[in-house]
Image: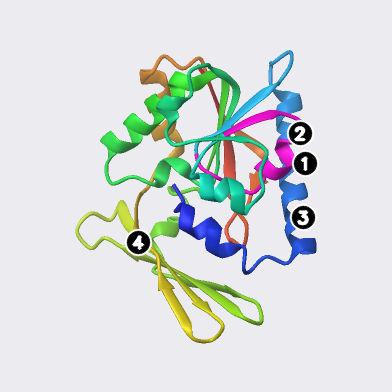
Amino acid sequence: MINNDYWLKIQGIADNTKWVEQAQSKIDIFEKLFDSLPLNHIETIVLPSFNPVVLLLEQVYKCTVVGSQSLKYSWQSSSDFVDDISDIKKPTDIVLALDEYLTYASSEQDQRASLAKLKTITGGTLVTTLQDYKNAAPHKRNTVDSISNNEHIVVEQNILDKINRQNWQTHIYFIENQRDFTVLSPENRRTMYFKQLAKYSSDLNGSGFAVQKNLLYRGFYKRSYEHIITLTF
């Protein structure tokens, strides 16, 4: 999952007006998705990793986030924050695992274990996002992306594993006030294909799997769109 320190640092980049516009556009997509789900009523949502969309979701739903208390206070969120998925004792209507949550892993076993943990709290539907690794292979592009404002620059670099080409590392660097340099710990990543996720879901006795054809998600300050996928257990 995206490092908690990333979200603490990224606040320095955010323009409040643009930030709210981006967040609202994402909420509009999820509300359209929620309306299409076979659920009578949605009251509770869990985010297994922090994402700023929770600041708008929590105005309508009871939300729980797996993330540090420092994030809660920094972003002034009213949601409940817990340290681990195991701290959530009741199934939730929607689990919202955004930003390619299941690609933050070193092996297939890690990905299976992550999905199994999400299943334990999924009382209705799991919603996650993935890029199309079969047709686009974004992990094989050793690209460097950057975002900036007048005082801060964020550089993201993806470096492919030369031995196992299904794996890569994401490195993120912050330059603040033209002089302060922070390097976040690299995140181990692994491809997740649609059919692969469908198989993992089936192995956990999942009852439904769908790639939403007309809905796409793009993370905050990201260039690539991700497909929205729904799983039912």
Q: Are marks 1 and 2 in contact (CB under 8 Å)?
A: yes
Magenta highlight range: 49-64
Name the image quarter holding residue 64. top right
Residue labelled with disc 1:
28
Residue labelled with disc 2:
32
Please identify, in this view, whether the residue under mark 3 or under mark 2 is nearer the observer: 3
Q: Residue 175: percent from the left, percent from the top?
A: 50, 78
**Residue 20 tag number:** 3
Q: CA distance from mark 3 to mark 2?
A: 18 Å
Please identify, in this view, whether the residue under mark 4 or under mark 2 is nearer the observer: 4
Q: Pick whichever, 129 or 123, lies toward us.
A: 123
The three-letter amino acid code for the residue at tag 1 is Asp
Outermost residue on the left side: it is 163
Provide the secondary structure element on which disc 1 rests.
helix
Q: CA distance from mark 3 to mark 1?
A: 12 Å
The three-letter amino acid code for the residue at tag 2 is Lys
Q: Is residue 51 visible?
A: no
Q: CA distance from mark 4 to mark 2?
A: 36 Å
Instruction: Please give the name of the residue rendered at 67% of the width and 38% of the height, measured from the top-left corner.
Output: 78
Name the image quarter holding residue 18. bottom right
117 relative position to 127: left or right: left
Provide the secondary structure element on which disc 4 rests.
loop
Q: Would you say residue 220 sits in the magenta stretch?
A: no
Q: Are marks 4 and 2 in contact (CB under 8 Å)?
A: no
Q: Are marks 4 and 1 in contact (CB under 8 Å)?
A: no
Within 10 Å of disc 3 (Cα), the crowding (few <14, some 14-19, many 20+) is some
Q: Earlier in the sequence, mark 4 or mark 2?
A: 2
Residue labelled with disc 4:
185
